């Protein structure tokens, strides 16, 4: 949905400039303040929030899954947001942004929008298909976002995943080869931006070799300068030169080889500056050396990598001092009382400029970069919700889009090992298949995917790693003809667990996350002692093949396990359908591992 530009290049006041430099989140909002945390999803724009956007000339908003309940609701909300922006003194339209990377990170409802199996699955198709799926997935996601009035996507992730223990990136990366990551990332930038959606390349200067999640702590990358330039920075350098993305997002990570400057945290500790607040990294390297002249945005400032060490105002001032253009999620707005904090933040920022703590000319240039980007993509406050709805209904989750999703899922499946011609499975009617999965919903998804493809009537049992009866599991394995075991490593975060149904089923056998790998190993070992035909499936980052692959006759990697349909007794997702096709020999496993695992374990 191309939007016509409705504004000329305005001359902005200092307050307007600063408002444009803030990207606020709308995740939850409670009309009445209380001592409890507000957890009411914001699905329509309250008057107070509309007035704040108008009053402060806010530059953009970020939407979360709580804000995206249905196509109609999203379009209505975005119409309300742009209407609020149209009443501001600058009349500038909003950046309406979202994290719709595909795979693990998808904020639109999976049963409505096309979510895909993610970047590492795209990396697995590179040897056979080149950049084809990078281009196709970005094109589809951009078309679906733009029909909803969403104009910025925090993607692609071009971190080079070099650390098997990386808790936050892993399959969000295209892989471990910097030049392939660069090529696939450039193709995605073109796919998004040629279809009207601004990209935000992330996480500069690289989040690929960390074992701490910057949502929960402050990671440090101790690479030498040479390795940083060869690996971490290489994709950013290539894509800036080739595609010049609209935005680049910073990482809350310490890079002492690039900048060992220190700061004193709120609790009095002296610490190395994170990249988000490093002028050497943002201004000298990103703008100077890599010649990036676009808009730089922080990762969310409420993440522990920042919020544990700075007050919100300090955090924003420090990012602006480094040369960042937009502060993402600078303060939490959850109740009407929080608008006082927003007023105070703007006032403090104005005071910082007047006191020459912040450079007035740099703030002005920064605001102009933002305006230029809005002009370039012809963003507008004019929104036709009726036409948008017609267009969205025809576009989002269309058969053509779902077909590309299914193609990627199956082309990514990678066969790492196949002893004694275990695959494809030669199943006969009446045989017993025992499935071991991280939770019962994934057992159901695997079973139903096989049932949809196989013409044989089979018997199924399941062991959920969230909780199972060991005696029953041993009995099921003993009588099974085939064992299909899946694992997700690193551990699933709370939001990714299929459901708490397993614990409700039988709380006596509930396992915590730390015990689940031991339980899986024990079950696989038991199956091996019984000489069972066993297939191990790495459902996320394939590094776990080094730990579990030796217990199985055959090993597959899918890089994804997302469930798109979860209604009553129907559980389905593209990765499970693709796995069933490969398991039963309906499709070949064409994927190639995009990361290195211990070779002695992957026979």
Image (spheres, rainbow, N blue to C red):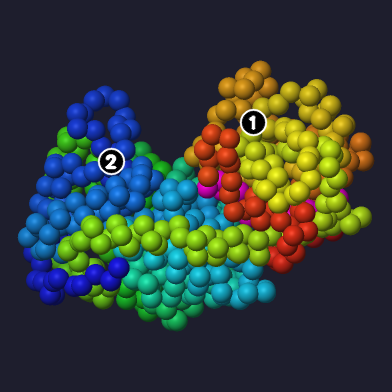
Foreground: 451 or 346? Answer: 451
Q: Residue 242 location, x and y as percent?
A: 45, 81
Task: Tell me the element at label 1.
Answer: loop
The residue shown at (13%, 75%) is: 9
Q: Is residue 403 above or below residue 129?
A: above
Region rendered in magenta: 551-564
The residue shown at (28%, 71%) is: 2
Q: Residue 462 location, x and y as percent?
A: 72, 33
Q: Residues within 10 Å of mark 2 (few under 14, many from 20)?
A: many
Looking at marks 1 and 2 on the same chain, the residue that comes earlier in the sequence is marked by 2
Residue receiving disc 2: 42
The residue shown at (54%, 34%) is: 568
Mark 1 and mark 2: Cα distance apart in space: 32 Å
Foreground: 474 or 302? Answer: 474
Residue receiving disc 1: 466
Question: Residue 118 vs residue 370: left or right?
Answer: right
Quadrant where the C terminus sits is: bottom right
Does residue 556 show up magenta in the picture? yes
The quadrant holding residue 331 is top left
- Number of marks present in the image shown: 2
Residue at the extreme bottom of the image, as rendered: 242
Q: Is residue 139 above or below residue 455?
A: below
The answer, for residue 162, to whether it is visible in the render is no
Question: Residue 366 vs residue 449: left or right?
Answer: left
Task: Tell me the element at label 2.
Answer: loop
Q: Which mark is on residue 150?
A: none
Q: Residues within 10 Å of mark 1 (few under 14, many from 20)?
A: many
The answer, for residue 115, to whether it is visible in the render is yes
């Amino acid at each position: 949905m191309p939007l016509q530009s409705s504004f000329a290049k305005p001359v902005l006041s200092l307050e307007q400039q600063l408002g444009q430099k803030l990207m606020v989140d709308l995740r939850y909002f409670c009309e009445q303040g209380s001592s409890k945390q507000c957890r009411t999803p914001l699905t329509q724009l309250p008057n107070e929030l509309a007035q704040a956007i108008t009053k402060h000339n806010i530059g953009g908003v970020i939407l979360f899954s709580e804000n995206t309940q249905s196509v109609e609701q999203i379009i209505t909300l975005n119409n309300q947001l742009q209407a609020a922006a149209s009443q501001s003194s600058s009349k500038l339209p909003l950046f309406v942004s979202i994290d719709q990377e595909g795979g693990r990170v998808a904020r639109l409802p999976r049963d409505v929008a096309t979510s895909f199996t993610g970047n590492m699955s795209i990396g697995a198709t590179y040897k056979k298909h080149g950049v084809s799926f990078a281009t196709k997935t970005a094109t589809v996601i951009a078309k679906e976002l733009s029909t909803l009035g969403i104009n910025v996507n925090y993607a692609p992730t071009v971190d080079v995943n070099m650390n098997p223990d990386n808790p936050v990136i892993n399959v969000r990366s295209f892989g471990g080869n910097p030049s392939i990551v660069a090529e696939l990332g450039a193709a995605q930038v073109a796919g998004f931006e040629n279809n009207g959606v601004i990209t935000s390349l992330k996480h500069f200067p690289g989040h690929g070799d960390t074992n701490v999640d910057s949502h929960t702590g402050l990671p440090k990358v101790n690479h030498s300068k040479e390795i940083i330039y060869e690996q971490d920075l290489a994709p950013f350098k290539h894509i800036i030169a080739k595609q010049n993305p609209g935005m680049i997002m910073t990482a809350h990570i310490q890079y002492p080889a690039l900048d060992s400057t220190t700061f004193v945290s709120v609790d009095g500790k002296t610490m190395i500056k994170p990249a988000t607040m490093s002028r050497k990294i943002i201004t000298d390297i990103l703008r100077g050396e890599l010649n990036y002249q676009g808009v730089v945005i922080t990762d969310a400032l409420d993440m522990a990598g920042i919020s544990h060490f700075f007050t919100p105002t300090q955090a924003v001032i420090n990012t602006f001092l480094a040369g960042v253009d937009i502060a993402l999620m600078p303060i939490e707005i959850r109740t009407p009382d929080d608008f006082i904090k927003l007023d105070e933040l703007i006032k403090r920022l104005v005071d910082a400029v007047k006191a020459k703590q912040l450079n007035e000319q740099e703030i002005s240039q920064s605001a102009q970069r933002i305006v230029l980007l809005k002009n370039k993509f012809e963003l507008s406050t004019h929104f036709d919700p009726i036409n948008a709805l017609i267009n969205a209904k025809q576009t989002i989750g269309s058969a053509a889009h779902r077909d590309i999703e299914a193609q990627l899922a199956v082309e990514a499946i990678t066969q790492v090992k196949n002893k004694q011609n275990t695959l494809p499975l030669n199943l006969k009617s009446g045989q017993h298949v025992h499935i071991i999965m991280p939770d019962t919903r994934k057992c159901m998804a695997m079973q139903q995917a096989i049932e949809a493809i196989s013409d044989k009537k089979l018997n199924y049992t399941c062991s959920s790693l969230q909780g199972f009866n060991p005696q029953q599991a041993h009995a099921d394995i003993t009588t099974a003809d085939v064992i299909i075991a899946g694992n997700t490593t690193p551990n699933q975060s709370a939001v990714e667990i299929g459901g708490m149904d397993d614990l409700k089923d039988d709380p006596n056998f509930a396992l915590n996350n730390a015990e689940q790998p031991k339980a899986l190993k024990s079950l696989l070992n038991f199956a091996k002692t019984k000489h069972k035909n066993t297939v191990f499936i790495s459902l996320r980052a394939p590094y776990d093949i080094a730990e579990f692959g030796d217990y199985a006759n055959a090993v597959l990697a899918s890089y994804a396990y997302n469930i798109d349909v979860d209604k009553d007794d129907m559980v389905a997702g593209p990765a499970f359908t693709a796995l069933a096709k490969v398991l039963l020999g309906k499709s070949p496993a064409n994927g190639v591992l995009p990361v290195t695992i211990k070779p002695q374990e992957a026979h």
